[in-house]
């Protein structure tokens, strides 16, 4: 008697939630690779990041999305639109909620929109950071959220330490619709190396500057040269909205931008597994966050 061949499955699972819920940390933990930058600051992720995960015969296409918040700038609107487009295009939506923050106004608004009759999408609730929340608080929070949206399933996890992720992964694999795989099984993402380089630089800006500076900057890879010795030369431009931000970013005698470049270079060398020569240029460009060209360079659709 011949063995039964496992059914090939493939589908998209979008991770949505309020800023700082841990979406990028969850994506990186589930895929076992650094695909999305992570910082303690909210609104770090600006565009959708795809993570390709194999689980048995199932190919799970995880989509990390920007945090959903009340937008003000054109950039903000493009980020929020990217998040909702990711949800609308997915076979399954995971609402990731910071269990420590609980049912905030932002989370309530997201859950209510997911529950709208016209949405008609499969949704799961994933409570994150349960390792730092007292257990008695979790069940009432779960009940409140399910009363809002009636999720198919609820999971309690810690993206930081991996608690509960095996069960989530197994459930995701079973939930993917039958069908052929859309990407080679050994691929991890569709993110280009040029965009990865820009994101790693931006991560260091978020980690090393404060207040409005990281939110007033964007990074674009201007030039990429593969060298004969196996190394790569990368030239990137950091755009800032105001002269004051430029001064802070450069630092006294260029000390801040040198440190940002040095740490980004080390991280890129690790991720690309090759020597990296990184050169950064800082330019003031007022209103870059309202420019369609800058949004497209970030991989975002213009919302206006």
Image (cartoon, helix red, strand yellow):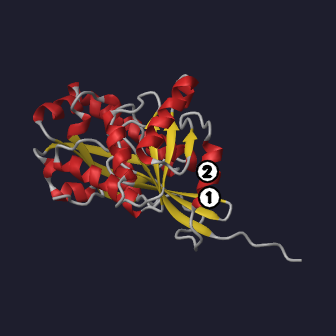
In the visual, does 66 lie left or right of 168? left
Q: For this rendering, which residue is in front, 27 or 142? A: 142
Q: What is the quadrant of residue 247 in the picture?
A: top left
- Tell me, yes or no, whether the two marked residues, 1 and 2, touch with CB atoms within 8 Å: yes
Q: For this rendering, which residue is in front, 283 or 90? A: 90
Q: Which residue is mark 2?
A: 169
**Distance of label 1 from label 2 (alpha carbons):** 6 Å
Instruction: Return the x and y of residue 118 as percentages of the image width and height.
Output: 34, 61
Q: Quadrant of the C terminus?
A: bottom left
Residue 186 in sight: no
Q: What residue is at 13 percent from the left and 31 percent from the top?
A: 244
Q: Secondary structure at mark 2?
A: helix
Which residue sits furthest bottom?
1
Instruction: Return the x and y of residue 252 as percentages of the image width and height.
Output: 21, 24
Instruction: Return the x and y of residue 280 as percentages of the image width and height.
Output: 28, 44
In the image, residue 178 above or below residue 191: below
Q: What residue is at 38 percent from the left and 36 percent from the top?
A: 20
Q: Quadrant of the N terminus?
A: bottom right
Q: For this rendering, which residue is in front, 201 or 121? A: 121
Instruction: Return the x and y of residue 72 as percentages of the image width and height.
Output: 17, 43
In the visual, does 135 lie left or right of 7? left
In the image, residue 94 above or below residue 213: below
Q: How many marks?
A: 2
Mark 2 crowd level (few <14, some 14–19, many ≥20, 10 Å Cα)? some
Q: What residue is at 68 percent from the left and 61 percent from the top?
A: 56
Q: Secondary structure at mark 1?
A: helix
Q: What residue is at 62 percent from the left and 58 percent from the top?
A: 173
Q: Which residue is mark 1?
A: 173
């Amino acid at each position: 008697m011949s063995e039964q061949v496992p059914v090939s499955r493939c589908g998209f699972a979008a991770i949505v939630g309020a800023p700082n819920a841990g979406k990028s940390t969850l994506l990186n933990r589930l895929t076992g690779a650094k695909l999305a930058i992570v910082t303690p600051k909210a609104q770090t992720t600006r565009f959708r990041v795809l993570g390709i995960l194999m689980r048995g015969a199932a190919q799970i296409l995880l989509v990390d999305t920007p945090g959903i918040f009340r937008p003000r700038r054109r950039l903000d609107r493009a980020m929020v639109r990217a998040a909702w487009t990711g949800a609308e295009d997915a076979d399954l939506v995971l609402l990731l909620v910071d269990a420590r923050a609980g049912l905030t106004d932002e989370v309530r608004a997201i859950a209510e929109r997911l529950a709208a009759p016209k949405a008609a999408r499969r949704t799961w609730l994933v409570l994150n950071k349960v390792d730092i929340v007292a257990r008695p608080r979790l069940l009432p929070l779960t009940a409140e959220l399910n009363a809002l949206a009636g999720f198919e399933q609820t999971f309690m996890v810690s993206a930081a330490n991996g608690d509960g992720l095996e069960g989530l992964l197994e459930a995701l694999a079973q939930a993917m619709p039958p069908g052929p795989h859309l990407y080679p099984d050994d691929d991890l993402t569709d993110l280009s190396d040029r965009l990865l380089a820009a994101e790693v630089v931006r991560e260091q800006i978020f980690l090393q500057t404060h207040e409005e500076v990281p939110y007033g900057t964007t990074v674009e890879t201007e030039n990429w040269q593969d060298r004969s010795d196996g190394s790569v030369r990368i030239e990137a431009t950091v755009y800032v909205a105001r002269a004051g931000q430029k001064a802070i970013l450069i630092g006294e005698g260029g000390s801040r931008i040198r440190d940002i470049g040095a740490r980004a270079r080390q991280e890129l060398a690790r991720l690309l597994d090759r020597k990296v020569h990184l050169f950064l240029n800082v330019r003031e460009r007022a209103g870059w966050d309202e420019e369609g060209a800058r949004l497209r360079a970030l991989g975002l659709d213009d919302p206006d």
